[in-house]
Each structure stands twice: as structure tokens, then as C-alpha cells.
Image (tube, rainbow, N blue to C red):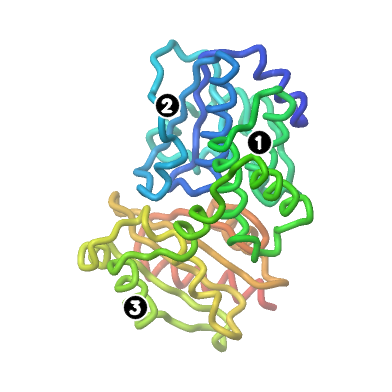
């Protein structure tokens, strides 16, 4: 059943001992949405934890500052910003597949894996939906919740640069500013600060970037060896996904990351009329029109060959 934010609030008001799931390789939207809900529901006297499959970049630590994990017998499981159970990551998928009661999402590629779903494809971020759910819950939005929601919105819109940004996006961000969101520091940490290791990784990636299909496709690869050489890790480098698309003339950019378990994660960014979600669906993934992702096993060269063929078909 597809619920609206008011119906979600009514459902959550009846629940307790809640676990909120985030997607693997967590970003600002899945984390900001989860923690905003956690804080709001706890303020109403409920017991709530959030879980993620992968390590979280330390830059997000301000989101759950002051929160401690609560001990309780889990009664209700929900997911935020997750289009498919594949995006839970291996451990969470194994534990929770088929047992998720509610999914809150904004991806057009959503697969309706939960018992109930709140899907709003026009929302720039899941955090926009979460804002209205919290309003309907009647929970007070303090500066910490406001910072969580602002983080989700700002990161999923590239600090309001991406095409998914709407008038409502700006409105909610402004409301969060009024509620005390630390927008200045969030913007600096999320969009301006890089470590020396991150800059070195970026340099190596750009040096080896490949161009195909008359320079309309750019492919960048990050290996585990590159992480070791630069002292970085996968959870530090989400922003790098946008680099291949920044080259003039490139219609589709892909950043392929080697994961510690030997599999590969691909982040696809496109310019209109290219559809990143359609490209990634060919590999079992999905996402938005201009930003999507997928995972794959096998050799890097096999994947690149298939990816080039899929993009070539989309370009026709």
C-alpha cells in the first residue's frame, strides 16, 4: 500500500521499538532522514535505533551527536532512501529481506519491497518526505533535527545545483534554517573540505580517466590499491562520482569503485536526455534520471565492455 506522509505519521504513532535501515555506502540523505526520524520519534517517547551495513564517514558524526543506541526487542522495521533491497548491503539484506514493514523513498526505480510504502518521486530527497512526516507526528523540530533534514536535502541536490531541486526544496531548506540548522558548517564540511589524501586520490583518478563513444562517455576507476596508496577509503569519496560528468561534452560519466569483498560499485551521472537509472537497471541497480548506481561481480573489463554497449544504445 502506498501511504502519504500523514498516513505514515499515523502508522508510526502506533508503533514502538523501531529499527530504521539505511542503504549501503550511506550518504547524507539516508543518514539525515534516518536520524531525523530517530530524534523525532524518541522525542515522543519511542525507542528507536538506525542501522547501516557499511562504515560511515566521520564527517556525518554530528547527525547523531548525543544519541546512544537503545536496548529493546525490535517490533517494527522500516527503510529510508532505499529503492531496492539490494541497496541494504549484504548483511542487512540477509537479516531483513522480506521483513520490512515500511519504506520511505523518492527514487523512481523503487521496487515496493516493503509491506507499506511512502514513495514521492517528485521529492528531491527522502529528507523532504521525512520533514512532512515529522510535522504530522507533531514532534518539535529542534536545531538537531533541522540539521539532519538539511543535510539530506543539500547532499542529494549537490547543494541545490542538481536538476531535482524544486521550489519546495528551497522552501524546506529555508524552514530548516529558521529552525536552527547549522547550514554554514554543513555546507563547508559537505562541499568544500577535502583531505590531502582525497585530493591525491582525485588526481590519480583524473590521470587515468578513459573516454569512449566519441568522448561522450567518461569512465573513472578507483581500486583498493589506490585507497591504500592515498590513505583514503570508500566512505570518504562519494563526491568523486560527479567528476567524470563535469568534463565538457560528456553525456554519461561512471565512477567504478572496487569494494573490499572483491565486488564493484558503479555510480552513474548523466546529462539530459540520458537516463542514468535506465542504464543501471541493466545491471540490477537504479536511482534517478541523472544519478543512479549498481553493483556487479566479475572482471572490471567485462563490466566496462557491457557498460559501453548499454550507453551506446542509450545514445542512439
Marks 2, 1: nearer the viewer: 1
Looking at the image, do the residues carrying marks 1 and 3 touch, with CB atoms under 8 Å apart?
no
Whichever of callouts 2 and 3 sits on the residue coming sooner in the sequence is 2
Q: Position of residue 304 (x, y in %)?
A: 44, 70
User: Does residue 224 appear anywhere in the picture?
Assistant: yes
Q: Measuring 54% from the left and 48% from the top, which residue is drawn there?
A: 182
Distance Cα–Cα, label 2 vs label 3: 39 Å
Instruction: Look at 42% across and 73% down and name the residue there.
Output: 220
Residue 237: quadrant of the picture: bottom left
Q: Is residue 56 above or below residue 272?
A: above
Local secondary structure at mark 1: helix
Residue identifier under label 1: 130
| Mark 1 Cα-neighbour bin, 10 Å: few <14, some 14–19, many ≥20 | many
Q: Nearer the viewer, residue 50 or 135?
A: 135
Find disc 2 in the rendering and name its residue. Answer: 95
Q: Few, some or many C-alpha atoms within 10 Å of disc 3 (few <14, some 14-19, many ≥20)? A: few
Identify the mark at residue 203; answer none if there is no mark: 3
Q: At which x and y percent is residue 234?
A: 35, 56
* Location of residue 114 with respect to 106 vertically, above or below: above
Residue at x 54%, y 20% (from the top left corner): 42
Task: Choose mark 1 or mark 3, whichever is in front.
Answer: 1
Disc 1 to disc 3, C-alpha distance: 37 Å
Q: Nearer the viewer, residue 178 or 134?
A: 178
Q: CA distance from mark 2 to mark 1?
A: 25 Å
Q: Is residue 109 visible?
A: no
Amino acid at each position: 500500500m502506498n501511504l502519504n506522509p500523514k498516513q505514515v505519521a499515523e502508522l508510526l504513532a502506533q508503533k514502538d521499538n523501531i529499527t530504521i535501515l539505511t542503504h549501503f555506502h550511506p550518504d547524507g540523505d539516508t543518514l539525515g532522514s534516518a536520524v531525523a526520524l530517530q530524534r523525532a520519534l524518541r522525542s515522543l517517547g519511542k525507542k528507536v535505533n538506525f542501522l547501516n551495513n557499511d562504515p560511515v564517514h566521520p564527517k556525518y558524526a554530528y547527525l547523531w551527536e548525543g544519541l546512544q543506541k537503545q536496548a529493546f526487542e525490535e517490533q517494527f522495521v522500516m527503510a529510508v532512501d532505499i529503492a531496492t533491497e539490494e541497496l541494504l548491503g549484504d548483511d542487512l539484506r540477509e537479516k531483513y529481506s522480506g521483513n520490512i514493514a515500511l519504506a520511505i523513498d523518492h527514487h523512481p526505480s523503487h521496487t515496493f519491497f516493503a509491506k507499506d510504502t511512502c514513495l514521492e518521486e517528485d521529492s528531491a530527497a527522502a529528507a523532504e518526505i521525512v520533514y512532512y512526516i515529522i510535522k504530522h507526528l507533531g514532534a518539535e523540530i529542534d536545531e538537531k533535527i533541522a540539521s539532519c533534514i538539511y543535510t539530506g536535502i543539500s547532499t542529494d541536490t549537490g547543494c541545490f545545483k542538481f536538476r531535482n531541486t524544486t521550489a519546495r526544496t528551497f522552501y524546506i531548506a529555508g524552514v530548516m534554517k529558521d529552525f536552527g540548522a547549522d547550514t554554514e558548517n554543513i555546507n563547508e564540511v559537505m562541499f568544500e573540505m577535502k583531505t590531502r589524501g582525497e585530493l591525491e586520490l582525485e588526481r590519480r583518478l583524473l590521470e587515468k580517466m578513459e573516454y569512449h563513444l566519441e568522448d561522450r562517455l567518461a569512465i573513472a576507476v578507483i581500486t583498493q590499491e589506490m585507497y591504500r596508496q592515498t590513505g583514503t577509503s570508500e566512505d570518504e569519496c562519494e563526491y568523486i562520482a560527479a567528476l567524470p560528468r563535469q568534463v565538457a561534452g560528456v553525456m554519461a560519466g561512471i565512477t567504478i569503485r572496487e569494494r573490499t569483498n572483491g565486488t564493484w560499485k558503479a555510480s552513474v551521472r548523466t546529462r539530459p536526455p540520458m537516463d542514468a537509472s535506465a542504464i543501471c537497471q541493466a545491471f540490477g541497480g537504479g536511482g534517478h534520471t541523472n544519478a543512479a548506481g549498481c553493483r556487479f561481480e566479475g572482471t572490471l573489463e567485462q563490466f566496462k565492455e557491457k557498460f559501453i554497449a548499454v550507453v551506446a544504445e542509450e545514445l542512439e
